[in-house]
Image: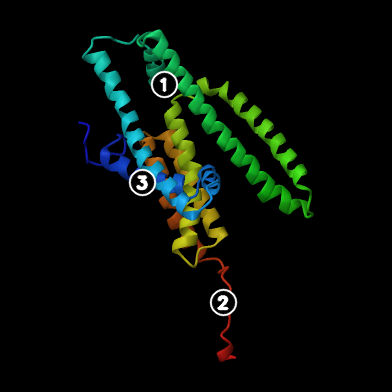
């Protein structure tokens, strides 16, 4: 049943998908550094709003379209009577279909598109990571101003280092297991708390960094434990980490002094 509204901890149902991807979209279009840097390239605030609106609608359409790939593969195997070889895991089914079922020209275009999409995603992430390291860590710790050329050179060196690390990790990707579950588990464990950090700052006045840090540690631990020790579906990881960090972070913040400094009214002095 495609449209299944019943909540289930072990299956991907429509109800859970809507909640999970709504929270993920909040992260992707609100606090994700890659998206923020792209939006900062637009000249006006109105341009940012239009770009976000158009991209969000297109993303919903594309994600929905990609979800039907699984239905197409199911029909190819069961209706078209083209069984896959025994022993294929879930990560190998679609590549096998591309190589053995699609015409040679089409399969080449699909593989090229996959590589292009991978490069466009990786280079944006590496660029954002190097920018964060230079601006948020190197400059404050250095304590003195350097010329812009030195910062650009350092950023380029970091891009090479991070790129080399990403290539090295890619060689071990085949040993990870379920790639989608691992990716969603990583994003849920570490991206959810980042969204919760911004939500705590926007929606509350009492939250502070120690409280958020406690919530993040607890949520990351819970998500990693669920990923490797239970059958809970990976679509739950992002909501659990976000909501868990928010609730624990706000509650724990009450145990620490407030970081908000109130200004006295001159009329009361």
Q: Is residue 205 visible?
A: yes
Q: Quadrant of the N terminus?
A: top left
Residue marked by disc 3? 22
Q: Residue at x 72, y 47 (%)?
A: 138
Residue 40: percent from the left, percent from the top? 55, 48
- Vertical arrangement, residue 191 with respect to residue 140, above or below: above
How far apart are the alpha carbons under marks 3 and 2? 35 Å
How far apart are the alpha carbons under marks 3 and 1? 25 Å
Residue 100: percent from the left, percent from the top? 38, 8
Q: Residue 19 — which label? A: none
Mark positioned earlier in the residue sequence (3 or 2): 3
Depth order, front residue of 253/35: 35
Depth order, front residue of 24/207: 24
Residue marked by disc 1? 91
- Tell whether 208 sits left or right of 7: right
Q: Residue at x 45, y 27 (%)?
A: 179
10 Å crowding of disc 3: few (<14), some (14-19), many (20+): few
């Amino acid at each position: 049943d495609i449209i299944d509204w019943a909540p289930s901890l072990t299956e991907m149902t429509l109800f859970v998908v809507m909640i999970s991807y709504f929270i993920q979209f909040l992260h992707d279009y609100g606090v994700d550094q890659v998206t923020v840097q792209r939006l900062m390239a637009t000249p006006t605030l109105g341009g940012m709003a239009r770009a976000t609106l158009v991209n969000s609608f297109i993303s919903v359409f594309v994600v929905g379209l990609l979800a039907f790939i699984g239905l197409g593969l199911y029909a190819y195997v069961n209706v078209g009577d083209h069984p896959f070889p025994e022993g294929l895991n879930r990560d190998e089914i679609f590549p096998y279909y591309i190589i053995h079922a699609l015409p040679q020209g089409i399969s080449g275009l699909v593989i090229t598109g996959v590589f292009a999409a991978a490069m466009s995603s990786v280079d944006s992430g590496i660029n954002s990571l190097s920018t964060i390291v230079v601006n948020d860590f190197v400059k404050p710790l250095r304590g003195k101003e350097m010329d812009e050329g030195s910062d650009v050179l350092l950023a380029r060196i970091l891009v090479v280092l991070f790129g080399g690390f990403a290539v090295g990790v890619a060689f071990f990707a085949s040993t990870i297991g379920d790639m989608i579950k691992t990716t969603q588990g990583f994003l849920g464990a570490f991206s959810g708390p980042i969204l919760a950090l911004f939500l705590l700052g926007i929606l509350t006045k009492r939250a502070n960094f120690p409280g958020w840090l406690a919530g993040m540690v607890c949520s990351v631990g819970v998500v990693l434990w669920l990923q490797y020790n239970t059958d809970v579906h990976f679509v739950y990881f992002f909501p659990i980490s976000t909501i868990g960090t928010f609730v624990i972070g706000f509650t724990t913040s009450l145990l620490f002094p407030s970081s908000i400094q109130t200004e006295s009214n001159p009329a009361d002095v």
